[in-house]
Image (spheres, rainbow, N blue to C red):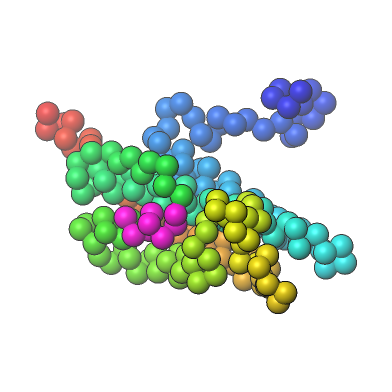
Amino acid sequence: MIFQRNCNDFDKTVIMNWRVGKNDHQSIRLGEIGDGYLLASRNIVASFNSDEKDGDILIFPALFNMMHGVEVYLKAMIINLEYIVHDRWGDPGNIHWLKDLYKTVEQLIQQHEQDALKELEPVKQIISEIYDQTEQMDFARYPLTSRKKPQFYIDTYKNISVDAEELYKAADICMDILNRMNWHFYEQAQYLEESKTVEG
């Protein structure tokens, strides 16, 4: 059984709702999950062994985890920024395109705190680099697109290389910046909500 406590070694038991709890705000829950995906990306990359060449297949979950971590964090920021800018908690929906999510964050920040865009610039550059390769955000999950076309790394005889050290740094940069900025906007949104309650 997977969903049970490890009775032999408590250190091998993980609690899913200790850091993603019932009373936590949705944007904080998303941020914690985002950290999990970004940390998983880093840990996978750190496990690459040049002798075994497992990296050639582990690169797919490593890239997926980094991209999904960024996606979840951008959605968390949209929730907070919508409250700050439009006085309602946002709903980012089921969008998975990083470029579109980042554009929404960018537009909201431009209406609130222009200087914050400088902080997010490295994340924007990482997203742009992904889109320079492909518009297909499922490329790390499936070898074919939703239209049954080969992904960019399938449809060539040329080696498509990834610098593992740069990928590790990218996941690290995203985790640091997105965590900091999500908390920044969450605290502002909470302050506004609490001020409204006091005034009411």
The quadrant of the picture occupied by the C terminus is top left
Give above or below for 194 relative to 84: above
Residue located 41% across and 52% down the image: 74
Q: Residue furthest bottom?
A: 158
- Name the quadrant containing residue 170: bottom right
The quadrant of the picture occupied by the N terminus is top right
Question: Where is residue 79 drawn, in percent x and y?
Answer: 33, 43
Q: Residue furthest left?
A: 199
Question: Where is residue 37 drawn, in percent x and y?
Answer: 58, 49
Give above or below for 99 relative to 183: below
70 within the magenta span: no
Residue located 64% across and 52% down the image: 142
Residue located 25% across and 43% down the image: 83
The residue closer to the viewer here, 168 or 193, is: 168
The residues colored magenta run 97-104
101 within the magenta span: yes
Residue located 42% across and 27% down the image: 23
- Name the quadrant containing residue 57: bottom right
Question: Where is residue 102 drawn, in percent x and y?
Answer: 38, 58
The residue closer to the viewer here, 184 or 117, is: 117
Q: Residue furthest right?
A: 51
Residue 63 at least partly seen: no
Residue 110 at least partly seen: yes
Q: Is residue 87 left or right of residue 35?
A: left
